[in-house]
Amino acid sequence: METLIKTGRIFYGIMIACLGAQQIPYADFRPVIFPPWLATMPDLAALAYLSSALLILCGLAIIFQKKVREVSLVLGGVFLLLILFAQVPFELIKDPYYKHLGVWSNPLKELVFAGGAFAVAGIYPPGNKEGKLLQVLDKFIPLAGTFMSITMILFGVDHFLYVDFVVKLMPAWIPGPVFWTYFAGVALIGSGITIILKIKLKLSAILLGVMIFLWFILLHIPRAIADPYGMQGNELTSVFEALGFSGIAFMVAGGYDSWKVTK
C-alpha cells in the first residue's frame, strides 16, 4: 500500500504543478481553478502568474515531500473557498444553464482537487505545534474520499444524461461506445457510493484509480496530442486531471485507514 500511496501522491503533485504551468502561456486562470469572473480586469495576467507560481510550488512540495502536510491542508482549504465563493456563485449568477448538471463540471472537479489535497495531508502525522488554522483544516481529512466520490457519482450520472456527448469522446477504434459509456457511468456511480459507505473501500478505490488511469492513457493523451491548443489547451488540462484523479483514488485506497488527524 505504501507504493500505491506514494504513486498517488506524485500523480496528484504533478497535476497541481502542471495546471499551474498551463496557465502561464495564456496569462489566464484555468476555469477549473477559477471561473471567468475577472475577464476584463487589467491585472488579470499578474494574478494568473501569481497563482501559477503558487500552484507549481505546491505541486513540487507535494512531489518532493517538503512541508507536505501544511501545504496540502492550505491548498485544500483554498480549493474549498474557491468552490464556495467563486465557482458556485459564478454558476448561479452568470451561467444561464445552471440547472443543467453538465455545466457544474468545474466546481465538481475542484471538489476532487480539494479532496486530493486533504488525502495527501492525511498521509503525514500532524506536527507538535500546528496552528489553529491547520487544526481546523485537518478536520476535512476524513472527507477526502467523500469529496472525490460526490464528483464521481455525478459524473457517472452525466454519462446517462449526455450519452451522445460522451460517446464522441471515445476513440473510434474502441467498439461499442454506447455500451462503454453506460458501463463507465455505472462504474463511477458504484465506486462513489461504495467509497462513501466504506463497502470494499480499498478495492473500489483501486478499481476506480485503474479505470481513470486507463482513460488517461487511452482517451486523454491521444485527444491532447490531436488538439493540444484548442480552448486554451482544454484537452491537455484533461490529461493532467485524469492523472491526478487516478492518484487521488490510489491514495484513498492505500491511506484511508491510516490518515492522521489532529485529536
Image: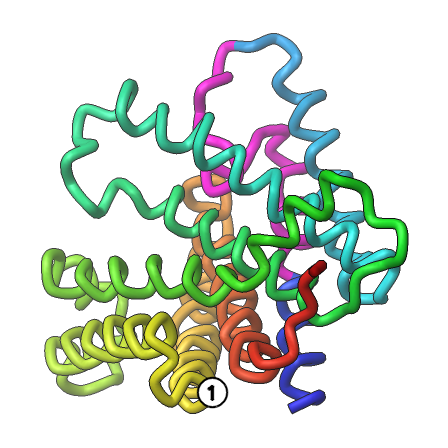
Task: Provide the secondary structure element on which disc 1 rests.
Answer: helix
Determine which quarter of the picture holds residue 127: bottom right
Query: Which quarter of the figure is the N terminus placed in?
Result: bottom right
Q: Is residue 70 magenta?
A: no
Which residue is pictured at 36% across the width and 31% down the height? Answer: 88
Residue 183 x, y percent position in the rendering: 18, 81
From the viewer's side, name the closer residue of 100 and 197.
197
- Identity of the amino acid at label 1? Lys
Q: Quadrant of the C terminus?
A: bottom right
In the image, what residue occupies the spot 86% across and 56% down?
67
Residue 90 quadrant: top left
Residue 27 located within the stretch drawn in magenta: yes
Give the class, few, some or many, for how many residues have Cα within 10 Å of label 1's Cα (few <14, many ≥20).
many
Instruction: Classify residue 129 as left or right of residue 165.
Output: right
Span shown in magenta? 15-40
Q: Position of residue 225 (x, y in %)?
A: 49, 64
Q: Nearer the viewer, residue 22 or 97?
A: 97
**Height in image: 69 above or below 9?**
above
Q: Residue 106 versus residue 227: which sits nearer the camera? A: 106
Location of residue 174 with respect to 123 vertically, above or below: below
Q: Is residue 36 above or below residue 135?
A: above
Q: Which residue is mark 1?
A: 202
| Residue 43 drawn at (x, y percent) | 66, 12
**Position above or below: 248 against 48:** below
Q: In the displayed structure, does residue 116 sit left or right of residue 209? A: right
Q: Residue 100: image x %, image y %?
A: 15, 40
Q: Residue at x 27, y 64 (%)?
A: 153
Comparing 7 with 5, the one in front is: 5
